[in-house]
Amino acid sequence: MEMLYDGMRLLMQRRNRHNALLNRNSIELPPAPQSTPSGSRPQSPVSEVAEERHLHRARATSRPVPPNPPNSPRLREGILEQNTALIRDFYASPNIVRAAHGLATYELLEEDEQQQQQQEQEKREEPPTNKATDENDESLQRYKESLGLGGGKDLSDASDPRVCIILSLTMESPGRDPVTIDLSSPGSEATLKDKPFKIKEGAKFTMVAKFKVQHEILSGLQYVQVVKRKGIKVSKDSEMLGSYAPNTDKQPTYSKRFQEEDAPSGMLARGHYNAISSFVDDDKKTHLTFEWSFDIAKDW
């Protein structure tokens, strides 16, 4: 029986400890017992459990309550008094505690009110548009002129749907007349592969592309060239030409000079080469692809 009573006592102690921790701020405790049970007769297990419960509750209420919030005027003034009602209300409404301690309070807004405030803030930050300001902006006007938007008569051909028309590709080298590949007529590039031109080994040369744009702005035009010898790819080069507006009578065509290159040299470099050239824009649209050939020789 004593073991049973001990087990019941431990169980009741754990249960009372848990309840005391949850309700320590709201339980009204009876005064602690002033007398002890008589030693003439054995103490009842029920009375021992009740005494342990009272002692445990007394110890729980003697523990310090949570401190004041940080930066509280009461804490700075050294006031140690705690309002247990405010501490209990903190979990339900923190604003009650913050207002009681002289701190700023915050209110949750509805979702519609938050969106409305955000839209009003964006309207205040949005700069006003002024067409007169654009007309007086010299740098903006120069930028438009660089794209061909500065005025002039549009030269777009309504019967030709092409946006970019490659007119020619010219090779310039010191000590030799320029060699031009005419691409202005549709289908003119079909016979270029059978008409190779000669390049001296080790010579410096520069390619120049001439073209025109119509109907719409051309964005990110790029020249891509793949060179093969006996079916094996030797090199792949690309050159960014830029973005262009449709041509006008003030500027009927565009021309772009590529970076200077050196022709390969040596006995092994001499021979016949085939090249595939393409003009592609940022939208991966190919405006022209053609094959041509050249020979690397010891002399012109």
Image (spheres, rainbow, N blue to C red):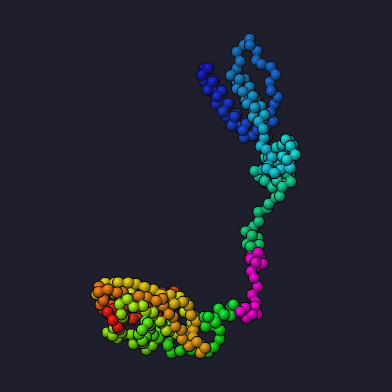
| Left or right of residue 235: residue 40 | right
| Left or right of residue 254: residue 226 | left
Residue in view at x 55 percent, y 78 percent: 143
Range drawn in magenta = 119-138
Q: Residue furthest top?
A: 40
Residue in view at x 71 percent, y 50 percent: 104
| Left or right of residue 159: residue 264 | left
Res. 282 image quadrant: bottom left
Is any atom of residue 163 visible in this view?
no
Query: Is 173 in front, or is 216?
Result: 173
Q: Position of residue 241 (x, y in %)?
A: 44, 77
Is any atom of residue 148 visible in this view?
yes
Q: Is residue 257 magenta?
A: no
Q: Position of residue 39 (x, y in %)?
A: 63, 11
Q: Position of residue 14 (x, y in %)?
A: 56, 28
Query: Is 185 in front, or is 202?
Result: 202
Q: Position of residue 234 (x, y in %)?
A: 30, 72
Judge whether 259 appears above or below 100 on screen: below
Q: Main secondary structure of the magenta part?
A: helix
Q: Is residue 129 magenta?
A: yes
Query: Is 159 in front, or is 29?
Result: 159
Quadrant (top left, top right, bottom left, bottom right) of the C terminus = bottom left
Residue in view at x 39 percent, y 76 percent: 260
Residue in view at x 51 percent, y 90 percent: 249
How many numbered dots are placed on residues in this image? 0
Judge whether 74 appears above or below 260 on screen: above
